[in-house]
Image (cartoon, grey):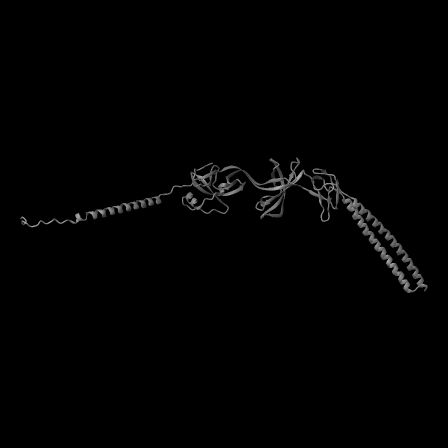
Amino acid sequence: MSAAVGAPLKQPALRPSQSDAPARQQRSRRWLRYGVVGAGILTAAWVALRVARTPKTATLHYQTVAIDRGPILAKVTANGALSALVTVNVGSQVSGRVQSLRVDFGSTVKRGEVVATIDPSMFLAAAAQATANHRATLAAVERAKAQQLNAEKQLARSAALQKEGLMTGAELETAEANLAVARADVSLAVSNVSQAKAARDQSELNLRYTTIVSPIDGVVISRNVDVGQTVAATLQAPTLFTIAQDLTHMQVDTNVAEADVGKVRAGMDVTFTIDAYPNHTFRGKLRQVRDNAQTIQNVVTYDTVVDVENEARLLKPGMTANVTFAYAHEANAVRVPNAALRFRPDATSVMEMTGGRVLPAIPPDRRLIWLLRGGKPVAVAVRTGINDGTFTEMAEGDVRPGDLAVVETPSDGPKRNP
């Protein structure tokens, strides 16, 4: 059937798919972008999860030292000063001008030998005056005795006359009083004699003190005056010389800290060096640990005295001695450097070194060291022995010569072994 002639032609209607094509394309591109971003986020999250679940590779490196066998000498060190066994300060007991000096530095003297004199002029005059006073008191005693004798005779005559009635009782009493006074005068005169004698003896003693002698056999190590110098002994005796008794036998006075005083004891052998002979080691014997504590800058020390033989006369008073007290010795000990005992890794390093395991508790008398075995660190509890400041004896524990002890875990850098 055909359409009517002259009827207008109808335009075909557009389908929805054709009219919404640009919008649909725009929405498709938007969803595509969303999909790409989402896929990226999921990929990043998956990678992060994989990384988190992947075990971390150890980053610690270990510095080690070797454990070996060898001698260990446990010792205490201290500083001290050399001195003579007996040192005497020779002084003057009287004041005056030094008239002469008979000895000098380094002079050898004998006991009783004259070493100096003080001008005796004033003391000679004082002694002469004291002697004259003593003689005058002796004469006074004789006079008092004569007066006493006269008073006795007068009393006897008065008593006879009184019996005959030729003298009154008052006159007799006067005679008796005169005799008592005469006897008192005798006693006073005798006392004056003793006093004058003491003054004379004192003056003669002061005169003898003007001659100064050595009280001991020894060597003069110090002279503090010169000829013509005036010394004053008003408050205390001024020191003229210092004399050391015998420099072939000397001593070292050292100060040992309270933390170490329990390790030293009388009779132990001692070695020391002095700066004057750095390549020579001197030997001595500990004589005494004194109980008198000394506190210097809040450090408590105890004086220890060491006897030293000085036959060669190399040692001199006042020299500084670097003393070593050896209190324990092991000739063939399993020893570890002290740095291994000081190594204390932090908690993070411990977790990495043990693979996350917790270290067991150790007894109070044990210490923990880390050994490197098969390339892996192993914690070993040990009981330590003596220590010489560099090495410590391994008295008990799973430690063998040749083991490598960890002393440090640097965060980077190559691993170093001795």
Which quadrant of the view contains residue 248? top right
Residue 306 seen by the camera: no
Residue at 17% from the left image edge and 48% from the top image edge? 19
Give x and y (percent) for residue 342: 49, 43
Task: Decide which of 311, 269 is in the foreground and name it.
Answer: 311
Which quadrant of the view contains residue 166? bottom right
Task: Decide which of 96, 302 is in the foreground and name it.
Answer: 96
Which quadrant of the view contains residue 118? top right
Give x and y (percent) for residue 213: 74, 42
Q: Is residue 142 above or below residue 82?
A: below
Label tally: 0
Residue 81 seen by the camera: yes
Give x and y (percent) for residue 96: 75, 45
Task: Decide which of 167, 266 is in the foreground and name it.
Answer: 167
Q: Is residue 183 above or below residue 247?
A: below
Q: Is residue 414 left or right of residue 190?
A: left
Task: Decide which of 196, 56 is in the foreground and name it.
Answer: 196
Q: Is residue 74 left or right of residue 57?
A: right
Residue at 88% from the left image edge and 59% from the top image edge? 178
Give x and y (percent) for residue 312: 66, 35
Residue at 85% from the left image edge and 56% from the top image edge? 185
